[in-house]
Image (tube, coloured by chain):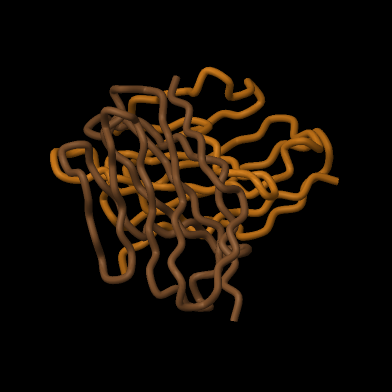
């Protein structure tokens, strides 16, 4: 089955700086890669996703890059703000099927004022 | 508003006492998922329904079962809860089609086992 590794487990950045979270996956059949933000006690919320036919996608301060050959994908957050503090999960699935998501272990992002 | 609803939000049960968690959706999605999320861990897929077809993950304990009586509703049954089953249970839905696999999560049910 799919295995998703996520690094780092904790990331502390100064407000206004950029944050980068990296994930690798094992199953070459995976072609859908979402990122979720989860605040304490709340549901995971989709912040951005990318499919394997695209190398990069951007939405305002958030971007995701995908290197399908290396099986790497990364989340980039620019101009970080206090409300960006949360746990971020990457995930992978064989999109196009109805399979569930395999999640990375999560990154606790802390924005220092 | 279209959404994924879970009831109850908090459930307390005793060791070994069966419990049922409920999920409903107004998105008319054809796939419904159940995830287990233990404290400080990532969500872990238990099983999913694609329409009426049930798909069980290989490592989901037999203690967990699910029912989907119609498109809108899905239930998670825990036959004999143990202390290790205390967790947040998340329901999610998606539409299996060509263009999107986005999964939308419900607010979760936090299960406590005494």
User: What is the x, y in percent for residue A84?
Assistant: 49, 71
Q: Colour of chain B?
A: orange
Residue placed at 47% from the left, 50% from the top? B23
In this picture, is B10 found above or below A55?
below
Residue placed at 83% from the left, 43% from the top? B14
Exactly how many numbered labels are in the figure? 0
Q: Nearer the viewer, residue B100 or A78?
A: A78
In this picture, is B92 found above or below A84?
above
Quadrant for the C terminus of chain A, please.
bottom right
Q: Nearer the viewer, residue B43 or B35?
A: B43
Q: Nearer the viewer, residue A7 or B109?
A: A7
Residue placed at 55% from the left, 74% from the top? A14
Residue placed at 20% from the left, 44% from the top? A55
Quadrant for the N terminus of chain A, please.
top left
User: What is the x, y in percent for residue B44?
Assistant: 55, 37
In this picture, is A51 found above or below A80?
above
Q: Colour of chain A?
A: brown
Left/right placement of residue A88 relative to residue B55 reads right
User: What is the x, y in percent for residue A24?
Assistant: 43, 34
In the picture as drawn, the residue positioned furthest to the bottom comes out as A113
Left/right placement of residue A51 relative to residue A20 reads left
User: What is the x, y in percent for residue A68?
Assistant: 26, 32
Quarter occupied by residue B62: top right
Q: Nearer the viewer, residue B30 or A53?
A: A53
């Amino acid at each position: 089955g799919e295995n998703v590794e996520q690094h780092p487990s904790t990331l502390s950045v100064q407000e206004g700086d950029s944050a980068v979270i990296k994930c690798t996956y094992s199953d070459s059949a995976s072609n859908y890669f979402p990122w979720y933000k989860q605040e304490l006690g709340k549901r995971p919320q989709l912040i951005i996703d990318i499919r394997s036919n695209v190398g990069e996608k951007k939405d305002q301060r958030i971007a995701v890059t995908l290197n399908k050959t290396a099986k790497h994908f990364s989340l980039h957050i620019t101009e970080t703000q206090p409300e960006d503090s949360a746990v971020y999960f990457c995930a992978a699935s064989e999109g196009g099927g109805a399979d569930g998501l395999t999640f990375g272990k999560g990154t606790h992002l802390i924005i220092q004022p | 508003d279209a959404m994924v609803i879970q009831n109850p939000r908090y459930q307390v049960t005793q060791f070994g006492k069966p419990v049922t968690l409920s999920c409903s959706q107004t998105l008319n999605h054809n796939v419904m998922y159940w995830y287990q999320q233990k404290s400080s861990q990532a969500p872990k897929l238990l099983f999913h329904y694609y329409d009426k077809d049930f798909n069980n993950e290989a490592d989901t304990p037999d203690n967990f079962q699910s029912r989907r009586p119609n498109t809108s509703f899905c239930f998670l049954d825990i036959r004999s809860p143990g202390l290790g089953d205390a967790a947040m249970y998340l329901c999610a839905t998606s539409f299996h089609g060509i263009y999107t696999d986005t999964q939308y999560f419900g607010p979760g049910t936090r299960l406590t086992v005494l």
